[in-house]
Structures are given as structure tokens and as C-alpha cells.
Image: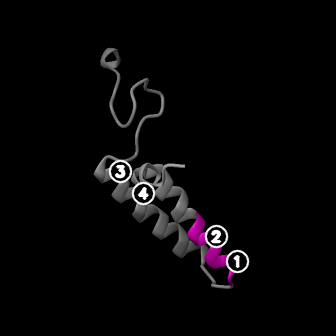
Amino acid sequence: MDWFNRFRNYGFWVSFSAYVFILLQALGFEIIEQQYLQIVNAGLGILVLLGIVNNPTTDNKGFFDDDEGF
């Protein structure tokens, strides 16, 4: 398994962040649903601003759009 490429993948970090919340709840930390939603919304807002959230329906790799879609 190529860990270097995995750590460079944004999808990995989004999944890992969700895992951290699940792990914290399993360990007994109380995370109020409203707090969780605020944290997730803030994180997704940052990802959108950075252009990390992509369109998975394109044929190109990464975060590039198809040429004929415009």
C-alpha cells in the first residue's frame, strides 16, 4: 500500500476526520449533535472555498472538468 499517495488524497482526510468523531464518541466523549453539525459545516465550507470538493461525474482524474461540458 502506498501510504504517501494515500495521505495526499483529500478523500482520505475527510474519511479520517469522520472516523475521529466516531472514535471520540466510542471512548466516551460527549459530542452534542449541534456542535457536530457546526464543526462539519465549517469544515465543508473550508473545503468548498479551497476547491477540494469535486465533481465525481467527470472522466478526468483529480479535480479537473471535462472539456465538452461547457
Coordinates of residue 36 in the picture (x, y in percent):
54, 71
Task: Please indicate whether residue 31 sits to the left or right of residue 40 in the image.
Answer: right
Closer to the observer: label 2 or label 4?
2
- What numbered label is drawn on residue 70? none
Coordinates of residue 51 in the picture (x, y in percent):
31, 46
Q: Which residue matches tag 3?
A: 48
Tell whether position 48 is magenta: no
Residue type pointed to by label 4: Leu
Disc 1 to disc 3: CB gap under 8 Å? no
User: How many numbered marks appear?
Assistant: 4
Disc 3 crowd rating (10 Å Cα; few below 14, some 14-19, many 20+) is: few
Q: Is residue 31 above or below residue 15?
A: below
- What numbered label is drawn on residue 26? 1
Disc 3 to disc 4: CB gap under 8 Å? yes
Coordinates of residue 37 in the picture (x, y in percent):
53, 67
The residue drawn where x is 51% and y is 64% is 17
Q: CA distance from mark 1 to mark 3?
A: 29 Å
Q: Which residues are magenta?
A: 19-27
Disc 2 crowd rating (10 Å Cα; few below 14, some 14-19, many 20+) is: few
Disc 1 to disc 2: CB gap under 8 Å? yes
The residue drawn where x is 40% and y is 31% is 61
Q: CA distance from mark 2 to mark 3?
A: 23 Å
- What numbered label is drawn on residue 22? 2
Camera-side residue of 35 and 4: 4
Closer to the observer: label 1 or label 3?
1
Q: CA distance from mark 4 to mark 1?
A: 23 Å
Closer to the observer: label 4 or label 1?
1
| Of callouts 2 and 3, the N-terminal one | 2
| Of callouts 4 and 1, the N-terminal one | 1
> Can you tell which quarter of the image residue 23 is in?
bottom right
Q: Which residue matches tag 4?
A: 44
